[in-house]
Amino acid sequence: MNYIEFTVFLLPEIVLLVTALAVIGIDCARRGKAATGAGGTLASASLCAAGILVAALIILIMPQEGRIAGGMLVLDPLTRLFKLVLLAMTLVAVLMLMETRPVRHVGENFAVMLFAAIGMMLVVGTEELLVLFIGLELTGISLYVLVGFARSDIRSAEAALKYFLFGSVSAAFLLFGLSLIYGFSGSTELGEIGVAMQAGGMEPLLAVGLVMTLVGFGFKVAAVPFHLWAPDVYQGAPAPAAALVASASKVAGFFILAKVLLLGFAGAEGGAAWGGFQPGWVPLIGVMAALSMVVGNLAALVQNRVRRLLAYSGIGHAGFMLIALMAATPAALASVLFYVVIYGLTTLGAFGVVTVVLRAREGDRLSDFAGMSRQAPLLSFSMLIFFVSLAGLPPLAGFFGKFYLFTSAMGAQAAPGGQPGMLWLVLLALVMSAISLYYYLLVLKQIFFVEAAEGTPVIRASKTGTWTCSILAAATIVLGCYPGILLGPIRLAVGAAF
């Protein structure tokens, strides 16, 4: 192995690691109350932002393609694009952390965010199961710490414990499933595993490995029935940590899930067309998709806290994305990756607004958003854009994202005898999308049409928070009017990778 080339491939991650260690060093040097004030937060955030920007610049100037050790590290247009997306989302989470109340050891909080970003970049940059598992665990451990960082809040500690327990169990399932797949194929490289599956057929031991692997990945993307951690984590975690879990973590999770299914599990698809069910991973994904859409959207209807509402909404959106994955084509993969980026941007923006409300009114009940449009009109308009996009209304990015998802699913092969293929799932998704509009409108009603109670604190956002949410809202509008800006590069990158 050429270790110089190995270092070049990992240079963005190395930059983030050095930055994280420098942030911890600065935090240790600023002992005492100075480290908890605005000055310590600004210094740590500035250094984190600089490290992220340098890492992004390195990705832009790195070679277009390359592989090391048979897929241990992979560099191609698709990987480069999604590493940049993850860095951008981490940068937004860093800016959101500046909007929260100062805490002790704030530098460590920023540093752990960078460690999580390193793990996610390793996940999207490999086609080797061992490196994939290491990246997932680095990401998971970092997120467990971030969720429980508010040590004085018992809800944060409870959320971190639940997240850790669920994550540990899912990691065990995933590792056991991957070990069975290795035993079947004799390889830990996704391409070679796919070749072995196409040649060997569906054996009982392989079926068990597939199920266990999907259990592990189901936790990562918060799909039913592996979703129980999500509402408590979103509610109890500090808002920036919850935003990172809901956006960047989900982007990385769906990216690697799609890659494992389409590369590693090629030949073991089966079928879930109406009247034509066949054993494989597609019917399993179909069941998860249907349950996720129904449970996520119906449970969101009765929530009175916005973070829990966003959690159940995310579960429903995971179901939408799983539908397109069932088509098992490069076009479907492109639509899933396009939608997960759109979902990540809008959810980040929504959590950015929630962060401001939490700081001003110390709560995220629906009533805490009352009268917001008169006190923070730009933030209110941004929230309108985010929720309308999540509901899938034109002309915003969420509408075109769902359109491409559903058309990809409809393009899947029909069942024998002319049955309508995935139409049953697409119809269910359309019904659930209509239901989702109701609970998004509940929040918007409070923001725009309900007066704040007398004595309620005024919502004031810093320029950083306002401009961050406004830029994300503008990106949502632009990607709705011109989806090809993002979808075009994703389609080209997917075509080159597959």
Image (cartoon, grey):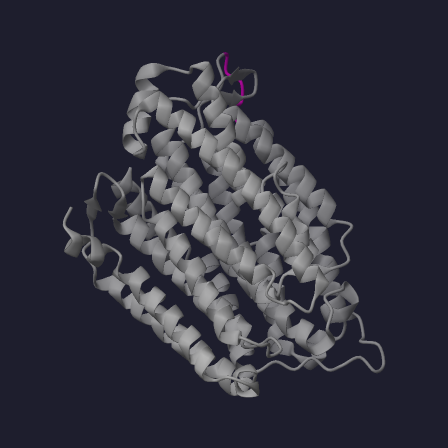
Quarter-wise, where is residue 235 in the image? Answer: bottom right
Locate the C terminus and report the quarter of the image it occupies.
Answer: top left
> Residue lying farthest top?
417
Would you place residue 411 above or below residue 81 in this image?
above
Work out whether residue 311 can be spotted.
Answer: no
Residue occupying the point 42% across, 25% down: 180
Is residue 184 positioned above or below 120 on the image?
above
Q: Position of residue 146 (x, y in %)?
A: 55, 62
Q: Is residue 330 magenta?
A: no
Residue drawn at x 48%, y 35% is 174
Residue drawn 57% across and 82% down?
Answer: 462
**Residue 213 falls left or right of residue 69:** right
Part of the protein shown in magenta: 417-422
Could you tell me which residue is drawn at 59 percent across and 76 percent down?
Answer: 103
Q: Splitting the image into 4 quarters, where does residue 238 fall?
A: bottom right
- Can residue 434 be spotted in the picture? yes
Instruction: Please identify the dominant SS of the magenta region.
Output: loop
Residue 355 rendering spot, x and y as whole percentages:
62, 70
The image shows residue 222 at horizontal and vertical percentages of 58, 44
